[in-house]
Amino acid sequence: MDPTQMADQTMQESPKGGVARYLPLAAILTVAAAGAFLLRDYLSFQTLADNREALIAFRDANYVATALTFVGCYILIVAFSLPGAAIATLTGGFLFGLFPGVLFNAGAATVGATVIFLAAKHGLGDRLAAKMDASGGAVKRIKDGIREDETSYLLIMRLVPAVPFFVANLIPAFVGVSLRKFFLTTFFGILPGGLVYTWVGAGLGEVFARGETPDLGIIFEPHILGPIVGLAALALLPIVIKRFRRV
């Protein structure tokens, strides 16, 4: 074996190399824990209400800088699972309107989710995927089921509000989903819900004038949830058809 290859192999097999794989995911979990404790009182609706005039003035004077700063902050909130993602979405609608606010919100959330996905895939995903392939029983059946129609499963996880966003970022990494498919299904899967919350944010001016708090539970109203569930059912259709063909 060539000396250079031997050196590379030694580095790959060294404990330091093994530990380094987990550093990105460990950093995300550490910042998430610290953020949940330190930032929960700052990333709130009340903070947005108290600073709304200053935010609007800054946006009017520096639109591009405001947009870039907002998107960057939103990416950090999602990437490190910090509290305030819902408030950030409302802020996007409040500052930029339904459009381009929904694109800023969905794009930033997708990039932040991709950071978590890559950290998990780099640290644990490849090894877990290999172990799932090697194992039998229910674990392998779950992975095979997802791989059989990845797009449908990934869209359903994004469309159904019952699946926590952080969990929906990890599962694809652990079963070996490709980066491209993860990115696209995340963006289009969160778009309907993001559209609703951005719309609520776009109407915050009237909410502030009445001294009220926006109803974030609006997404569970039948006229809102119905179409989203319909999209989830549409995403589920290819899986159902394949099952019936096997019978």
Image (cartoon, rainbow, N blue to C red):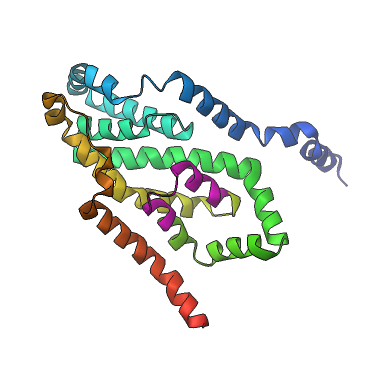
Residue at image coords 54%, 54%: 177
Question: Residue 89, position in %: x, y?
Answer: 30, 35
Question: Residue 25, position in %: x, y?
Answer: 59, 35
Q: Is residue 44 left or right of residue 95?
A: right
Residue 99's image quarter? top left
Question: Residue 194, position in %: x, y?
Answer: 30, 44
The boundaries of the magenta stretch are: 156-173
Q: Is residue 136 above or below residue 127?
A: below
Residue 51 visible in the displayed image: no
Residue at image coords 26%, 58%: 227
Q: Is residue 76 above or below residue 150?
A: above
Between 225 and 32, the one lying in front of the other is 225
Between 213 and 227, the one lying in front of the other is 213
Q: Is residue 98 left or right of residue 171?
A: left
Residue 85's image quarter? top left
Residue at image coords 59%, 42%: 120
Q: Is residue 221 above or below residue 150?
A: above
